[in-house]
Image (spheres, rainbow, N blue to C red):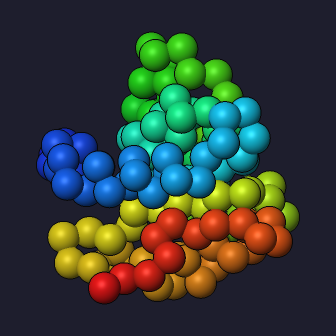
């Protein structure tokens, strides 16, 4: 699992696209972000750096421990760690931005459609889902 995370963290095109999407919707100090399938926490760390008020990371795997350690080592304090699959969360905190990069090597491999359909429960009215579509 960690080898796969290394590969996606090194994917400059992927990361630039996600950074551009977050940059376009984050206004410093305002948004609450839900990061579904957060893995190492990269997207929440990026959202925090861009000025998110707080980030809620949802990850069921042991990567949550790594994410916590990385956040501590990098002194990122506006994070909330929920070690559950997002579909198991009852009454989630409503977020202005919900992001999920649960694509895998093939677009539908990690259940992105099901994840994003469920992600609407985490979203405030008028909020933003990232990704908005698959092409």
Left or right: residue 25 versus residue 41 is: right
Where is residue 118? Give x, y as percent. Answer: 63, 79
Where is residue 29? Give x, y as percent. Answer: 72, 33
Where is residue 53? Give x, y as percent. Answer: 72, 35
The residue positioned 17% from the left and 50% from the top of the image is 11
Q: Is residue 72 above or below residue 109?
A: above
The residue positioned 58% from the left and 69% from the top of the image is 129
Residue 100 in sight in this render: yes
Left or right: residue 56 versus residue 36 is: right
In which quadrant of the rendered view does residue 110 lie? Answer: bottom left
Where is residue 12? Give x, y as percent. Answer: 18, 47
Q: How many marks?
A: 0
The residue positioned 54% from the left and 14% from the top of the image is 75
Left or right: residue 80 versus residue 2 is: right
Quadrant where the C terminus is found in the figure: bottom left
The residue positioned 20% from the left and 54% from the top of the image is 13
Q: Is residue 38 above or below residue 120?
A: above
In which quadrant of the rendered view does residue 98 lie? Answer: bottom right
Q: Is residue 27 above or below residue 88?
A: above
């Amino acid at each position: 699992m960690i080898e796969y995370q290394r590969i996606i963290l090194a994917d400059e095109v992927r990361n630039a696209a996600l950074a551009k999407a977050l940059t376009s919707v984050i206004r410093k100090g305002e948004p609450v972000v839900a990061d579904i399938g957060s893995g190492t926490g990269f997207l929440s760390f990026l959202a925090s750096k861009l000025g998110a008020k707080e980030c809620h990371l949802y990850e069921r795997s042991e990567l949550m421990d790594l994410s916590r350690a990385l956040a501590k080592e990098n002194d990122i304090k506006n994070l909330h760690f929920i070690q559950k699959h997002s579909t198991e969360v009852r009454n989630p905190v409503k977020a202005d931005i919900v992001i999920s990069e649960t694509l895998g090597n093939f677009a539908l491999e990690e259940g992105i459609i099901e994840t994003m359909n469920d992600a609407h429960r985490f979203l405030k009215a008028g909020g933003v889902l990232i990704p908005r579509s698959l092409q």
